[in-house]
Structures are given as C-alpha cells and as structure tokens.
Image (tube, rainbow, N blue to C red):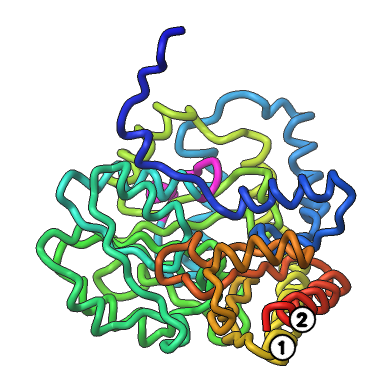
Amino acid sequence: MVKNRIADRIKLLYGESAFTIMAAANELEAQGRSVIHMEIGQPDFKTPRNIIEAAYKAMNDGHTGYTPTAGITPLREAIARYCTEHKNVETDMENVVVVPGGKPTIFFSTQMLVQEGDEVIYPNPGFPTYESVIRFAGGTPVPMPILEKNDFRVDIDRLKQDINDRTRMIILNSPSNPTGGTLSAGDISAIADIVRGRGIYVLSDEIYDRIYFDEKPVSIASMPGMRDYTIILDGFSKTYSMTGWRLGYAVMNRELAEYMSLLLVNSTSCSAAMTQWAALEALKGPQDAVLEMVAAFRERVDYIVGALNSIDGISCVKPSGAFYAFPNISSFGLSSDEFGNRLLKEGGVAASSGMGFGEFGEGFIRMSCANSMENLKIAVERIDKFVKTLR
C-alpha cells in the first residue's frame, strides 16, 4: 500500500473539542444513556418561520445557481445599512463580503495578512480556530490572557506589553466564546488608542453582539481611525438561529474585500443563493424572535450562574453576553479535561473542557445555556450529585 503523502502544513490545524464531546455524548445516548447537552454553541430555537419561507420562495423563484462571489447586491446593501445603524460603522456594500459561515472570515483574514514571522495576538481562552489558523498561515500565536480576575476582559496593560514591531493583527471577541465576557466601551477605546497608527489590523469577532445582557457591545471599527484597519466578523448563525445555514459576512476596507473575494472564488466560489435571500429577510424582517431568544438566554444564564454558585466547590462569574457559563472547577483537583470527561460518563452532562479553548482555560469548563430550562435544571442536579462524589 502506498503511504499517503500529506503536506506538513495540514498538521498545524486542529479541530474543536466541543464536537469531540458531542460525538462521545451521542455514543452514550446510542447505548441508552441519558445525556444533557451543554457542549455545543448552537441556539436551541428554530430558525424563524419568515426566514425559512424566504429561502423556500427564493428556490421556487429560481435562485439556485451561482451568485456574485462577494454576495448578492441586496444582501450586501442590507448588511452595510445594518452595520451603519447597529454597529455605528458607516460603510457600503463594496466593503462587504458574504461568506459561508463565520469561520471563513477567520481563515481568510489570516491568509491575507499574516506571513512567516508575523505575530497575532488572540484571546485565550478563546475560540480554538483562532490559534489554529494563525499557525496555518505561518504566523506566531501570542495568547492574550482573558482571566476570571479581570471579569474575563482584556488586560490593557498586558496587551501594551505584548505588542511589538512583529505584531500584525489582534483578534477581539466581544461578547466572548467561551467566557461570555464583554469588552466595555472604555476597553475598546483604550485598545484603539494602543493600535491606532501602527499598521496593526484588528479582526473583530462580533458574532454574538446581539446577544448581550448589560451594556451594548461596541465595535472597534466605530472608533476614530479604526474602520480601515478592522475586519468585522459577523453572521446569522447565533442571532437568527441559523447555524446549519452556513452564512456569515465580513466588513473591511475595499482593498481587503477584493483580496478576500479572491480567496472565496478560489475555495467555494460563492455562498449558497437561497441562504443569502433568507439572510436578507432576517435583516429586513421582524426582529421579535431575536428579542425573545435573547430574553430566554438571559433567564437561563441567570439561573445557571446562581445554581452553579450554590454548589460547593464551583464558582461562576456571571456572563454579560453570548449564552455560555464558564464555571471554575479547579477546587476539585482535576484537570478540565478529566472533569469534563467524568462529568459526561459519570454524571450524564456534556460540557466542554476549558482547555479546549486554550491554556488559560485550565480549571474551567464551558457550559452552553442553549437548552431548555427543564433540561438545565436536570443538568444542575446531576452536576451537584457528581461533584459530591469528588469530595
């Protein structure tokens, strides 16, 4: 048998632990075990009906072929208006590239901007794709610690120290996956002051910016002098419960938009036509479902945080956005991986190890509140019962 010849660079990529945990949980369920799923960052609500009907109409109207690489004009125009009105970032359709999901923006941005020897500062704990694609692009990942003692916000002084002449890009994520922390307007302003005029780009992951419980998140692209040095990542997966539709968008200066379109045409050609028309309806149609979903997440997060903090040995900072809790389980003397694996096998609750989000996630687990209140209550009971076996 001829041995496969695999390019070395593919070994620089790695997957997401949440999907590994989900597979293990599904296997237990296939054996007849009961598992409460809190591992995957996916809203448990159905896609709003008006969006589904818009996709159906688009297909019936013949929108089943290729589209322009950067996306259909009505959707790009609507996204530009949305960014101007909601994010306070004045832009137009020429700055918008529609992509199949949120991850392509991370991948394409690093491929466009990062070369051998460049450093990219990224949140840790943070979405695991960040570090993976930085390495794949030949860059050096520089972790930006997002710590519990700072309410899971950026340490501005530490960031100043980490920036040097090799810093090419900084990745921000607010509200954050996995911590639920949100950068304040003051944080954003301070970061803008640090990077402004230095030729450093910011990849601003704003995929959760409609799901917030306190202060409305601020886009760094809205800060003076930052629009042309910011790539905004956003999409429809979280806000409109459209994870499986695979549709997102990126907003950036026109030169970068042209280069991102080149990467897109060489990889997927374009995003699916019918999903783009559905996304147009998502932006232009009623927003009641979004408000109802956020209200439900707020209620669930409030419950989970209070319930976890009542369990001896667990502490949990209340998140200010997204739909995750990130409890501290370090008192039990187990690694995050071991705690998560045993919680699944012995306790019947699937949660993600904090280490799956970076070294500074050790001692924590991520719990998605995208499940019914009934199931969350069962999960808390099971967690309480499980940790009593550890004492």
- Residue 298 visible in the picture: no
Q: Secondary structure at mark 1?
A: loop
Report the residue marked by disc 1: 311
Q: Amino acid at mark 1?
A: Ile
As for residue 300 lying within the magenta part, the answer is no
In 3D space, how far apart are the residues under numbered discs 1 and 2 (Cα atoms)? 6 Å
Nearest the eye: 309 or 90:
309
Locate residue 332 relative to residue 69 in the image: left or right: right
Residue found 27% across the figure and 75% down from its top: 192
Q: Are marks 1 and 2 in contact (CB under 8 Å)?
A: yes
Report the residue marked by disc 2: 384
Locate residue 104 relative to residue 55 in the image: left or right: left
Residue 113 in the image: state x and y as whole percent. 25, 48
Find the magenta span and give its range. Answer: 92-102
Crowdedness near tag 2: few (<14), some (14–19) or many (≥20) residues, C-alpha within 10 Å: some
Residue found 35% across the figure and 54% down from its top: 252
As for residue 98 lying within the magenta part, the answer is yes
- In the image, residue 58 sits, relative to residue 117, either above or below, namely above
Image quadrant assignment for residue 183: bottom left
- Residue 379 visible in the picture: yes
Q: Give residue 143's mark.
A: none
Image quadrant assignment for residue 44: bottom right
Circle nearer the N terminus (1, 2): 1
Image quadrant for the C terminus? Answer: bottom right
Q: Secondary structure at mark 2?
A: helix
- In the image, residue 86 sits, relative to residue 62, either above or below, namely below
Image quadrant assignment for residue 230: bottom left
- In the image, residue 210 sits, relative to residue 139, either above or below, namely below
Crowdedness near tag 1: few (<14), some (14–19) or many (≥20) residues, C-alpha within 10 Å: some
Residue found 37% across the figure and 54% down from its top: 131
Residue 59 in the image: state x and y as whole percent. 75, 30
Q: Amino acid at mark 2?
A: Asp
